[in-house]
Image (cartoon, rainbow, N blue to C red):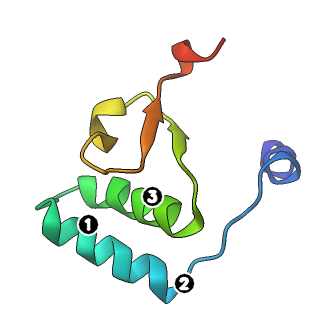
């Protein structure tokens, strides 16, 4: 199963009230609306856990978040 393979290679980070508070701040500060609130949630979790890079086909969705670097799959050597 692919999920088990991913779990072996990547840590699963816990959710916490700190992630919610950071998410709320990001949504308010950046005036995030609609489906983009989900990207804000990912950014919040990254910032709380010290994760700096995210692999995504939608780099533009993350440029508004300082401390988060979005990388497209075709940029991986």
- Residue drawn at 47 percent across, 88 percent down: 17
What whole-number distance in Å separates the C-alpha atoms at marks 2 and 3? 13 Å
Q: Name the residue under label 2.
A: 16
Residue furthest to the bottom in view is 17
Could you tell me residue 11's position as x and y percent? 77, 58
Q: Quadrant of the C terminus?
A: top right
What whole-number distance in Å separates the C-alpha atoms at marks 1 and 3? 11 Å
Could you tell me residue 2's position as x and y percent? 80, 42
Report helix, strand or loop for mark 3: helix
Instruction: Name the quadrant containing residue 30.
Output: bottom left
Q: Nearer the viewer, residue 6 or 26?
A: 26
Above or below residue 38? Residue 76 is above
Report the disc number at residue 71: none
- How busy is the neighbourhood of tag 2: few (under 14 within 10 Å), some, or many (20 plus)? few
- Residue drawn at 58 percent across, 54 percent down: 51
Are dots 1 and 3 in contact, CB under 8 Å? Answer: no
What whole-number distance in Å separates the C-alpha atoms at marks 1 and 2? 16 Å
Lower sequence index among marks 1 and 2 = 2
Above or below residue 72? Residue 55 is below
Are dots 2 and 3 in contact, CB under 8 Å? Answer: no
Could you tell me residue 23's position as x and y percent? 34, 71
Above or below residue 59? Residue 74 is above
- How busy is the neighbourhood of tag 1: few (under 14 within 10 Å), some, or many (20 plus)? some
Report the disc number at residue 42: 3
Lower sequence index among marks 2 and 3 = 2
Question: Could you tell whether 3 is left or right of 64 in the image?
Answer: right
Report helix, strand or loop for mark 1: helix
Residue furthest to the left in view is 31
Q: Which of 3 and 46 is in front in this view?
A: 46
Q: Name the residue under label 1.
A: 26
């Amino acid at each position: 199963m692919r999920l088990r393979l991913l779990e072996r290679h990547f840590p699963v980070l816990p959710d916490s009230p700190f992630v919610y508070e950071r998410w709320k701040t990001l949504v308010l500060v950046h005036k995030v609306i609609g489906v983009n609130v989900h990207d804000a949630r990912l950014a919040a979790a990254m910032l709380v856990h010290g994760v700096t890079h995210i692999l995504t086909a939608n780099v533009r969705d993350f440029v508004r978040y300082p401390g988060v670097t979005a990388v497209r799959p075709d940029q991986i050597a």
